[in-house]
Image (cartoon, rainbow, N blue to C red):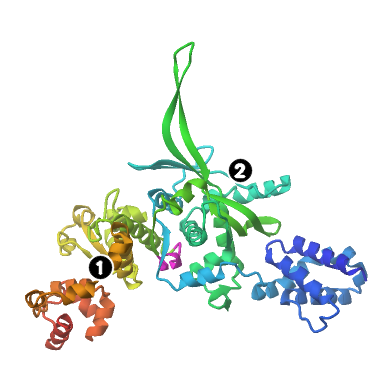
Amino acid sequence: MPPQNDVQNRFVEFANETFLDYPELIAAWEADMGKIYDINSDDFQPCQSLKAFLVIINRIAMEHSLNLQEIDEWIHLYSSEIRDFVIPYIQFEDSNNVSPNQNIVTELLNQSFIESGSALLYHKLRDTISKNEFQIKTEYPTALINEKTLKATAQVRSEGNALHLLSSEEIDQWKNLTAQAITSMDDLTADIFDIISILWMRQASHKDQMINFHTDDALNLRQVQGRKSIEGYQSAYRKKERDEIMKRLAALTTIWIRIERDKLKFVDAESNEIDELEQVQFNPLFILDSVTVAYRDSQPVGIYECKIRPGELLANFLYGSKKSSGLLALKTLKYNPIKQKYHKRLARYLSWQWRIRQKGADYFRPYSIGGDKGLLNVMGIQENGRYGSRIKEHFENILDTLQQDGIINEWKYLESFNESMVEENKNWFHDNWINAKVQIVPPTEITVQNNKEYLSLEMGESEQQEMNFAAILRNMTKKETAASEVMEMDVTPENMKQTRLNRGQKLAAVAKEIGISHTTLSRYENGKISNPTEENMLKMKNWLNKL
């Protein structure tokens, strides 16, 4: 029998060639083979995949009368058979390679809203990625971001951001991996953009800090169910689920950002002609190191795990004095990137808008439905009157789902929109509905958190500590106290809705507290029930005037 180290090296070499798409397998086999040879480890049981490998090797040798000592001469002839036998044991075992972000991800999963980037550049880049607005007619697929306060260019480039790859063969493999990146720009890629940024913001102590990223981190934060759970952290994911994440992480590494600056002017001393050159800042979106690339059938699939950080430009908006962050609903990441892509886009947009509206507490300003700045355009839904009823219903269902999932508190059309016009006017879609506006109320988590942050900026720490609200209340005069007492309120749709909003309660919770159905309360608040039963009126009155 060949010496121990020779056997280990040969097995590992064979595994590298045969199981390229399972990068976590090699380290597990190396560790277990070392323990098998340990004279004090007679009772040691290797991982299931290594057991399966040894079983199939032995079976092949017996069935074909092959000598195990001459394994080098025949093992590769049976690589397909060995692979087919071993793979099921890899899938259910998933090795011992657990992400170092396990605790952080588990903490984030216990929150309804998590801190995410909210700068204009961040939001526009994410939107560009989700809708794949890159033009492919140029040498590099290019997207232009043109706002009043921001002019930027994003390009997809397959070279230059692979410093960790040293050999020419690895560089060729990397280019092969990223060559089709433009086809992977979608809402799932936008999710990965958010997830990496969220994890980095949570851990970074300086702008150049690298963090570990594992495909399982993204699958956990997207709340995809694995086949194993370690203290709440899912693992043992299927190949397809991991492939989708790996492919999109690779795509993100190809994006470079260019911020337009003032033009530089050079004057030719002889001809006096002026030559204008653009002064630009050109940065990779993310910088990588220690990359593990997964393969299948000798072809690179994507990045299994790596160390990563935002490029210098993006890092400025996620860390330090220029940091701009808001709260993103965790359920945004959970929505299906194909079937619920519009839910994702609207949830991201509202998160960004609420951060903008924080300073003036301007949360109730309505949103337009149609137009360049309207919600249909935000979601990427075309204004096609031919399918007016379907679009309107889809739009309302999206908002209803966001409300049910707690991403928004509630929504409603402004009074200027009359539902009856839909039946009376054949051109209602373009004449009426597209020009209507909706009010979208953020959840209490958003308004409370944003107000806390704003107050901490507006009011010094010592001033906050000295302000004793209990003392202020105790010092109120009897006259002031009497004046502040609430008169008994009448039950009206307006009073019910406004009181509920003032108390920061969701419609479903209030309906349960009152003892009526969610649908009944919703229809009453929206004026669709004009004469509630006496029993329901009494229940609502008791709730409305409770202390």
Number of other residues with Cα within 10 Å of mark 2, as a class: few under 14, some 14 to 19, many 20 or more: few
Residue under pointer 2? 160
Question: Where's residue 275, x and y in %?
Answer: 46, 21
Q: Give the side of residue 139 with respect to residue 410, left or right.
A: right
Element type at marker 1? loop
Nearer to the camera, 232 or 384 = 232
Q: In this orientation, does residue 393 appear? A: no
Residue depicted at x 47% and y 69%: 108
Q: Give the side of residue 457 with respect to residue 145, left or right.
A: left
Nearer to the camera, 147 or 357 = 357
Q: Residue 465: within the magenta? A: no
In the depicted structure, whether residue 309 falls above or below residue 513:
above
Q: Give the side of residue 217 with respect to residue 398, left or right.
A: right
Q: Residue 330: within the magenta? A: yes
Element type at marker 2? loop
Nearer to the camera, 168 or 83 = 168
Residue under pointer 1? 467
Q: CA distance from mark 1 to mark 2?
A: 56 Å
Quadrant containing the N terminus is: bottom right
Question: Where's residue 159, x and y in %?
Answer: 61, 43
Q: In this orientation, does residue 250 appear? A: yes
The extreme bottom residue here reads 535
Residue depicted at x 48% and y 62%: 202
| Highlighted magenta segment, given as a residue range | 329-338
Nearer to the camera, 162 or 202 = 202
Kind of residue at badge 2: Gly
Kind of residue at badge 1: Met
Residue depicted at x 58% and y 54%: 250
In the depicted structure, whether residue 355 falls above or below residue 534:
above
